[in-house]
Amino acid sequence: MNKTNARKRMLIGYALVLPAFLVVMLTVAYPILSSVIMSFQDGKTGEFTLENYKYFFVTESQLKNIGFTLYVVVVTVVLAIVIAYLLALYLRFVKSPISRAIGTLYLLPRFIPGLVAVYAMITIIRDTGVINRIAQLLFNYDFKPAMMYHASGLIIMNLWFNIPFAALMITAGLGAIPDSVIESARDVGASRMRVFRTMILPLSMKDVVVAATFVFMTNVGSFTTPYLIGGNSPKMLGIALYDQFNRYLDYNRSAALSVIMFLICSVSAGIYIYTNLKEKEWE
Amino acid sequence: MFKYLNPKRFYFAVGKKKFWEFIVLAVFILFFYGPLLNMIMMAFANEYEPPHLLATEWGTYWWDFIFQQNSLKSSMIQSFVVAIITTVCSMIICIPAAFSLARFKYPGRKLFMLSFLLTNAFPKIGIFISIGVLFYKYNLMGTLAGVVIIHMITTMMFMVWLPSSAFRTVHPQQEEAARDVGAGPIRTFFKVTLPMAMPGIAVATLYTFLGSMEEAQGTLLVGMGRITTMPVEMYGIIMDYPGQAGAVFGVLLMIPSAVMIFLMRKYIGPDAIAGGFKMK
């Protein structure tokens, strides 16, 4: 290919990507930038101040919200990844009608509207829900799950959303490990445990990290689940942000909280990008 | 048949391995589909009092109730109009970008790719709030265009990343073969590249359409009550009416997803979806 041709190709490439990029710049990057500026401004005078940030780090209830959010998100990530990994191993290495059925069924929850899924889960876990009714019918015991307005309800719901997603990512990664490689290791005498520890686990680590960081990012700012299941205090940061904006009409503080949440996410986004861009060594 | 109802007998009848597989399947179905099935049951319950597990009186009372609400029809129409416009606009803007990111090499390519991750890393409400300020300036608050923009940015990442990974699975040799026998670049794209990348594009379209159908917070903030889609309506119904009304609305909201999944079932697979979360 000669030089002018390569130049032409480059220009076509830019021309095709530019409209979408401009939309993102205008509707996402620009608002984010103006949020960052606003978060350093005083609501009335517009002067530079750190008060908006200070508020979230000295007010006890706000500190609790940050801690609570991190707790819920970290527990969600750990549980979702462990369960999803087991599920993915099962789907990859057990070939049976049941595993094929689960292999299809686990794709669907991602396409159910979030609001509907949360509502459906509430009918199960609320104090007059299905769990309570089964306990009453079977054991004649008025068992209150007490999951509504509590961290456990939030985590259960997050697991519903994130296990299928994480399992999907990990299954796709495990699918890329050829059967022949595993069989040859078994042939020369490696035990199942050893094959798992020295081959399968390292080869699928990248997908585990990608799934974990993505789950982390999407859950920090979640809104629908905590809005319907979460309690009043402490609350998830998504709700705290909505309150700052909607109830207290404090735009500068909501901007500051957005930036704080963005910083929390960006730790995970950084790991996500790093793992994603790192080449697989065995490829 | 009844002997299988006894766990011990079942265990010995099907064998150890099968037994545990059935347990896995049962737990899986109960956790992931139990809530949805229970909601569908509730939608057809006129009365649903504790401690009964099933409806105490079956019927379609709450369906009639929901269909009598005047706002329902308009919210359904608005939901579909917004979702269709969003999907079409998103495809027009994003698929060329996806193709460019997959096929062309130029400086800044990874940066472009990363810029789409922004929509998922910054809290959505934060974006909506500051975009609101911008919208006020250009009179986009409470307009269809404003809501479409909001819906587009929530799913844009998938509309770029998923097709992009799909385009990458099409080997350039296949395109070259078409070019060699005399097809022009545009014809090659529509006859060779696009059909082969279809699974990824189909899943991305599905994401965008359903994402738009379920988006509520942004619509609430930017629609200002003038544009009310079905999820916005459902927030109100959940708060104001008994559980069955919400269940009926939930079933109504699931129908578009069910139809879309059925139509695109042959494209939905783990690889097509997982590709959208990786950059190369």
Image: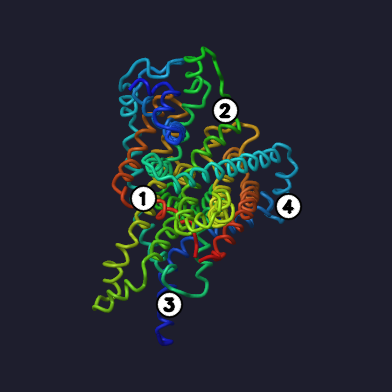
Label 3 is found on which chain of the structure?
A
* SS category of the residue bearing label 4: loop
Q: Mark 1 and mark 4 in contact? Answer it, CB < 8 Å.
A: no
Q: Is residue A226 above or below residue A211?
A: above
Question: Which residue is identified by label 3?
Answer: A11
* Type of amino acid at the residue the image marks with label 4: Leu
Q: Mark 3 and mark 1 in contact? Answer it, CB < 8 Å.
A: no
Asked whether the residues under marks 2 and 4 belong to the same chain, the reply is: yes
- Which quadrant holds residue A56? top right
Q: Mark 3 and mark 2 in contact? Answer it, CB < 8 Å.
A: no
Q: Mark 2 and mark 4 in contact? Answer it, CB < 8 Å.
A: no
Q: Position of residue A189 (x, y in %)?
A: 54, 54
Question: Which residue is identified by label 4?
Answer: A50
Question: Which residue is identified by label 1?
Answer: B268
* Type of amino acid at the residue the image marks with label 1: Ile
* Type of amino acid at the residue the image marks with label 3: Leu
Q: Mark 2 and mark 1 in contact? Answer it, CB < 8 Å.
A: no
Asked whether the residues under marks 4 and 3 belong to the same chain, the reply is: yes
Farthest left residue in view: B182
* SS category of the residue bearing label 2: loop
Disc 3 residue crowd, few under 14, some 14–19, many 20+, Cα 10 Å? few
Disc 1 residue crowd, few under 14, some 14–19, many 20+, Cα 10 Å? some
Give the side of residue A243 with respect to residue A116, left or right.
right
> CA–CA distance between discs 3 and 2?
56 Å
Question: Which residue is identified by label 2?
Answer: A147
